[in-house]
Image (spheres, rainbow, N blue to C red):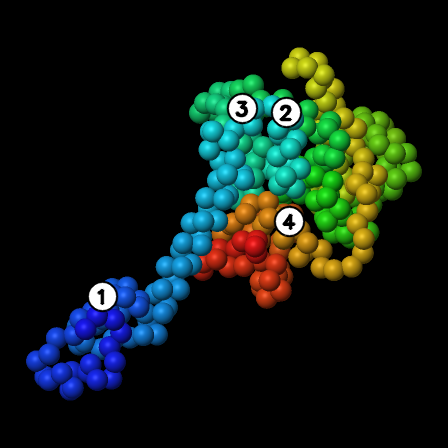
């Protein structure tokens, strides 16, 4: 008889030589669930079914990610306006694709300026300038919060990250505190002016600047391009001179975690904790899963809850 064996279907009831039919209707045939000794294992069957359901859910999320993160050429960004909309939709973008976070250049699907090269040579052949022009659009903030690398934030994402950056500003010491105090007093300034006014050499300023940009305390628009051949450097400014402050309350790590996962749709959990300059605590991930804001669609994966 097909299906899950009943007690009356045992080898004793049927006779020592009776053959049992592997179950198909309730659980689906799987040799692991029906060992050679004829003993059916329902708990293992349910575990296998759950695993298959988990796999299907992960596939569905990956398909959604392909569309929303523009991972195929048919979804390539065609205009700067589309790039701005992409940032507004996802909340945050890296410049180059290097993690599960959505990428500005990755979504361009354009050949590299110099195939096989390194650094700037790998930027898109013509759309590289968007990475500078996008920063001039309202509601866009360029930071180094991706572990010292470029991370574009929408206005909403900036508000979520604001508490952590303000903590970093308050904790600054030494040269970092001196530089922040100077900019707080004089406002945004060019690097050469800061060096002159503080009596610092270029190396000293560069070192302090790198530390502060990594935690968002300092921001700059980088290079400002009028066109492909006309450009100038943008000044440095404090973070708290840029975004609107966030409302206090809640776990700031949880806020940026959820924002990142929402941007990526689904990601390997090991990747998530290294997205930002501040490592996401493991207990924060677990807490967001328990709260229902995030879900684990399959072992080792994290996704936004529907």
Q: Closer to the camera: disc 1 or disc 3?
A: 1
Name the N-terminal-most of marks 1 and 3. 1
CA gap, disc 4 to disc 1? 42 Å
For label 4, the SS is: helix
At x 64% / y 33%, what residue is drawn? 85
Residues 82 and 261: in front is 82
Could one spot residue 286 in this view of the protein? yes
- Can you say whether 111 is above or below 153 in the image? above
- Per the image, the residue denoted by label 1 is 31
Name the N-terminal-most of marks 2 and 3. 2
CA gap, disc 1 to disc 2? 55 Å
CA gap, disc 2 to disc 4? 23 Å
- Per the image, the residue denoted by label 2 is 80
Label for residue 124? 3
In the picture, measured across the screen, residue 52 lies left or right of residue 203, that is left
In the picture, measured across the screen, residue 125 lies left or right of residue 160, that is left
């Amino acid at each position: 008889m097909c299906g899950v064996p009943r007690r009356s279907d045992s080898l004793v009831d049927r006779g020592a030589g009776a053959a049992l039919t592997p179950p198909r209707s309730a659980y689906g045939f799987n040799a692991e669930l029906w060992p050679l000794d004829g003993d059916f294992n329902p708990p293992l069957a349910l575990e296998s079914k759950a695993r298959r359901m988990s796999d299907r859910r992960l596939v569905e999320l990956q398909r959604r990610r392909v569309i929303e993160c523009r991972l195929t050429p048919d979804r390539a960004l065609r205009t700067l306006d589309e790039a701005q909309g992409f940032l507004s939709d996802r909340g945050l973008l890296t410049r180059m694709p290097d993690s599960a976070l959505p990428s500005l250049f990755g979504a361009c699907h354009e050949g590299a300026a110099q195939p096989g090269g390194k650094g700037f040579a790998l930027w898109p052949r013509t759309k590289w300038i968007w990475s500078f022009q996008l920063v001039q659009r309202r509601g866009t903030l360029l930071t180094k919060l991706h572990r010292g690398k470029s991370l574009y934030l929408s206005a909403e994402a900036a508000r979520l990250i604001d508490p952590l950056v303000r903590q970093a500003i308050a904790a600054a010491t030494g040269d970092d505190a001196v530089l922040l105090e100077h900019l707080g007093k004089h406002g945004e300034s060019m690097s050469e002016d800061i060096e002159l006014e503080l009596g610092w050499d270029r190396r000293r300023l560069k070192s302090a600047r790198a530390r502060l940009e990594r935690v968002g305390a300092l921001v700059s628009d980088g290079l400002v391009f009028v066109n492909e051949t006309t450009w100038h450097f943008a000044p440095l400014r404090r973070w708290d001179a840029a975004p609107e402050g966030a409302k206090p309350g809640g776990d700031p790590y949880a806020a940026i975690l959820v924002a990142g996962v929402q941007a990526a749709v689904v990601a390997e959990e090991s990747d998530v904790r290294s997205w930002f300059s501040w490592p996401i605590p493991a207990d924060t991930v677990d807490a967001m899963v328990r709260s229902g804001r995030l879900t684990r669609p399959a072992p080792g994966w994290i996704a936004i809850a529907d």
